[in-house]
C-alpha cells in the first residue's frame, strides 16, 4: 500500500526528526538526545520516515546513521508547485494593483 507523504509529515515528532537531520546526519542515540523522546519512539518514527522515502540510513559499526533522502521531498514539492504558481500569480496581481493605487 502506498504511503501518503502528508500523513507521514503530519506527525510533529517526525517533522522534528526531519528538521534535525536537515543540519547533519545523526545516529538514533543522537536523535534521542536532541529530541528528548524515547529510543523506541524515535526508532518507530524513523522506520515510518524510511518506508516513506524521507530518510535513508547507513550502518556505521554498531550504529545506524540517518540522513535526509530527497526522493519523497521531490514528490511533495511537485504536488505543491501548482499552488506556489497560483499564489505567486495572485500576489503579483495584487502587487500591481497596489502600485497603481
Image (cartoon, rainbow, N blue to C red):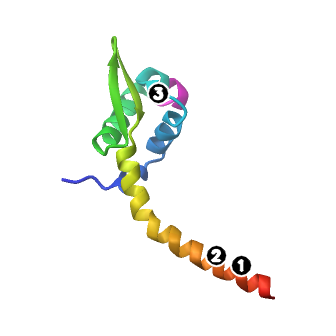
Q: Is residue 20 above or below residue 79?
A: above
Find numbered disc 1 in the image and state the secondary structure of the residue it sits on. helix
Looking at the image, which residue is at 46% across and 25% down?
A: 26
Looking at the image, which residue is at 47% across and 31% down?
A: 37
SS majority, magenta: helix
Give whichever of discs 3 and 1 has the lower sequence position. 3
Disc 3 designates what residue?
25
Looking at the image, which residue is at 54% across and 28% down?
A: 34
Region of the chain picked out in magenta, as a range: 32-37
Image disc number at residue 91: 2
| Mark 1–mark 2 CB contact (< 8 Å) | yes
**Residue neighbourhood size for the residue with mark 1, other residues' Cα within 10 Å, grouped as few (<14), some (14–19), many (≥20):** few
Pick out the residue farthest to the bottom: 101
| Residue nearest the viewer, comparing 16 with 53 | 53
Q: Is residue 61 above or below residue 24?
A: above
Compared across the picture, whether 101 is left or right of 59 comes to right
Disc 1 designates what residue?
95
Looking at the image, which residue is at 34% across and 11% down?
A: 61
Q: Residue 40: image x %, image y %?
A: 36, 28
Find numbered disc 3 in the image and state the secondary structure of the residue it sits on. loop
Q: Quadrant of the C terminus?
A: bottom right
Res 93 quadrant in image: bottom right
Amino acid at each position: 500500500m502506498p504511503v501518503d507523504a502528508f500523513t507521514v509529515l503530519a506527525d510533529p515528532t517526525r517533522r522534528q526528526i526531519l528538521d534535525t537531520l536537515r543540519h547533519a546526519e545523526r545516529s538514533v542515540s543522537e536523535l534521542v538526545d536532541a529530541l528528548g523522546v524515547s529510543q523506541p519512539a524515535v526508532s518507530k518514527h524513523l522506520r515510518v520516515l524510511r518506508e516513506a522515502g524521507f530518510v535513508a540510513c547507513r550502518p556505521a559499526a554498531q550504529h545506524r546513521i540517518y540522513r535526509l533522502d530527497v526522493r519523497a521531498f521531490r514528490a511533495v514539492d511537485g504536488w505543491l508547485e501548482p499552488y506556489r504558481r497560483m499564489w505567486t500569480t495572485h500576489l503579483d496581481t495584487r502587487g500591481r494593483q497596489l502600485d497603481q493605487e
